[in-house]
Image (cartoon, rainbow, N blue to C red):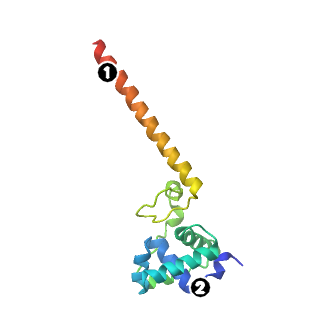
Amino acid sequence: MSPTDRLTARERDALRLYNDLNSAKAVAQKLDVSHHTVYQRLGSAKDKLGVPSYMAAARQLVESERIDGTESFAYEQFGVVPDRNSAFRSLVSELPWPFPTPGRPENDLSFAGKLVAVFGLAMMMMATAALYFFALGVFSSTLGRS
């Protein structure tokens, strides 16, 4: 029995829609329920699957249905056309990102992972600034000699 077998039909619908819409409010409009109800369903599903975020739960459900070949397209009744090419998403779009973005309202990183990511971004910014000032120094010294 896979972990996704413990999900209710309503939790599955909420997760499928969340996977395609990336917004609990949009899911609530499609299901004609309040966004609080959607958050309750997503939270319950997240807890049952033991994942850190709603998006991780949605991805796990969609992947398990794709692997099992039992994918239900019940959410099409709500007027959402699923991304049939989601299996071919680029590696970059699947990497964990330390900040919420419009396409990913949540992130999949732990606190330590966020610290490492922020530190890495800061190091990249400092390296870029150092390279800029080095190039500026080389350029200005070249101008000074002529």
The quadrant holding residue 108 is bottom right
Say which mark, if any, is on residue 127.
Answer: none
7 vs 107, nearest the viewer: 107
Q: Give the answer, above or below, for where 112 lies relative to 105.
A: above
Picture residue at 59% right of the left edge, 53% below the top: 112
How many circles with numbers are drawn on the protein?
2
Mark 1 or mark 2, which is nearer the start of the sequence? 2
Question: Is 130 on the left-hand or right-hand side of 65?
Answer: left
Q: Position of residue 95 (x, y in %)?
A: 53, 56
* Residue under label 2: 8
40 vs 27, nearest the viewer: 40
Quadrant of the drawing holding the N terminus: bottom right
Quadrant of the drawing holding the C terminus: top left
Amino acid type shown at disc 1 = Ser
- Crowdedness near tag 2: few (<14), some (14–19) or many (≥20) residues, C-alpha within 10 Å: few
Question: Is 95 on the left-hand or right-hand side of 21?
Answer: right
Picture residue at 47% right of the left edge, 57% below the top: 99
Say which mark, if any, is on residue 140.
Answer: 1
Amino acid type shown at disc 2 = Thr
**Secondary structure found at label 2:** loop
- Crowdedness near tag 1: few (<14), some (14–19) or many (≥20) residues, C-alpha within 10 Å: few
The quadrant holding residue 79 is bottom left
The quadrant holding residue 27 is bottom left
Picture residue at 62% right of the left edge, 72% below the top: 64
